[in-house]
Image (tube, rainbow, N blue to C red):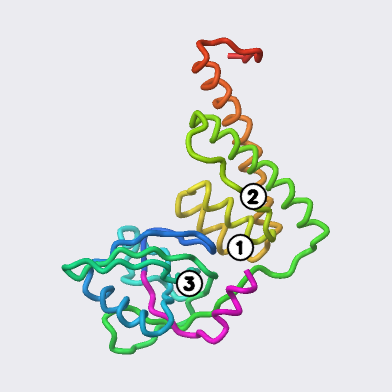
Amino acid sequence: MPQAIERLSGIRKLPIFPLPLVLLPNELLSLHIFEDKYRQMLRDVDSEGSFFGITLFEPQEQFEDRPAVGTIGCVAEIRESELLEDGRSNIVVLGLARFRLVEYQETGDPYLVADIDCFEDDAGDMGAIGPLAEEVFTLFQRMAVAAFKMSGGRGQLPDIQNTDAEALSFLVCAAFNFENEKKYSLIEMTSTEERLGKLREILDRAVGQIEESAEIQSVSRTNGHSKKTLDL
C-alpha cells in the first residue's frame, strides 16, 4: 500500500469517472468505454500517466448530478486497453489507492475533474492488528478451500498471500463482492483493525456454512457414501 501512495505522491488533480460501483485498492476491474466524454478522458489520461479516479455514484437515488465533495474513491490505473474500430474501448484498470474528493475544478473538459487527497489507513497497534490479520487470513483460506471443493476441484486453488494487513483486508473485501453500501463503508474506514474486525465477524458467520455446503456437495458426487455424518 505505501508504494501506491508514493507513486501518486505528486498527483493532486484527476479526471473523475462516477460509476455505480466501488473500486478497491489492488482490485482489477474491466470497463467498456462508449460515451464521447469518457473517450476523450481516456485520450487525455493516456498522455498523462494512465490514472483517473473512480467514485461511487448512483444517480437514481440522488438529486445531485455528480458525487458529493468528500466522497471516497479509488485511483484507477489503466493496465490494458483495446480500442475498437468505432472508437469505443475495452479497458482493464487496477485500483491503486483511496482518495477523498476535495473540490471540483472547472477545466472546460467534458468530464469531471477534481482535486483529490490520497490516503491510507492510520498507523495502528500492530500488537493487536497482527493476530487479527492472521485470524482473518486463516478463515479466508478455509473459505477458499471450501469454494474450491464446491467447484469439484475445477480450475486451480488460488494462491492467497498473507500480505500486509491493510492489503489483506481489501483482498477479502474484493473476494466477497459485497453490495455497494457495505463495500463503501469498509473503504472509508481508516483503521485496519476496525476493518479486519468487521471482516472477521463476516467470515466467522460464513465459513461454517460454506464448509458444510462443500461437504454436502462432495457427498452427493460420491452417491452419498462418506465417512462424515452430517446433521441434516
Apparent side of residue 21 relative to residue 6 in the rendered image (left or right): left
Q: Residues within 10 Å of mark 1 (few under 14, many from 20)?
A: some
Between 82 and 199, which is closer to the camera in this rendering?
Answer: 82
At horizontal 40% and vertical 84% (from top left) the residue drawn is 48
At horizontal 35% and vertical 72% (from top left) the residue drawn is 66
x then y, percent, for residue 149: 55, 30
**Image height of 157 relative to 101, above or below:** above
The residue at the far bottom in this view is 107
- Label 1 and label 3: CA atoms lie apart by 17 Å
Reading the chain from its start, which is encountered first: label 2 or label 1?
A: 1
**Image height of 147 relative to 102, above or below:** above
| Disc nearest the viewer among 1 and 3 | 3
Circle 2 residue? 198
Q: Do the residues labelled 2 and 1 touch (CB within 8 Å)?
A: yes
Task: Name the quarter where the N terminus is drawn.
Answer: bottom right
Quadrant position of residue 105: bottom left
Q: Which amino acid does label 1 sit on?
A: Met
Reading the chain from its start, which is encountered first: label 1 or label 3?
A: 3
x then y, percent, for residue 93: 42, 65
The residue at the far left in this view is 86
Marker disc for residue 189? 1
Quadrant position of residue 47: bottom left
Task: Name the quarter where the C terminus is drawn.
Answer: top right
Q: Does the magenta stretch include residue 3?
A: yes
Marker disc for residue 75? 3
x then y, percent, for residue 13: 45, 84
**Image height of 153 relative to 224, above or below:** below
User: Which secondary structure lies at badge 1?
Assistant: loop
**Magenta stretch, residue numbers:** 1-17
Q: Are marks 1 and 3 in contact (CB under 8 Å)?
A: no
Quadrant position of residue 171: bottom right
- Label 2 and label 1: CA atoms lie apart by 11 Å
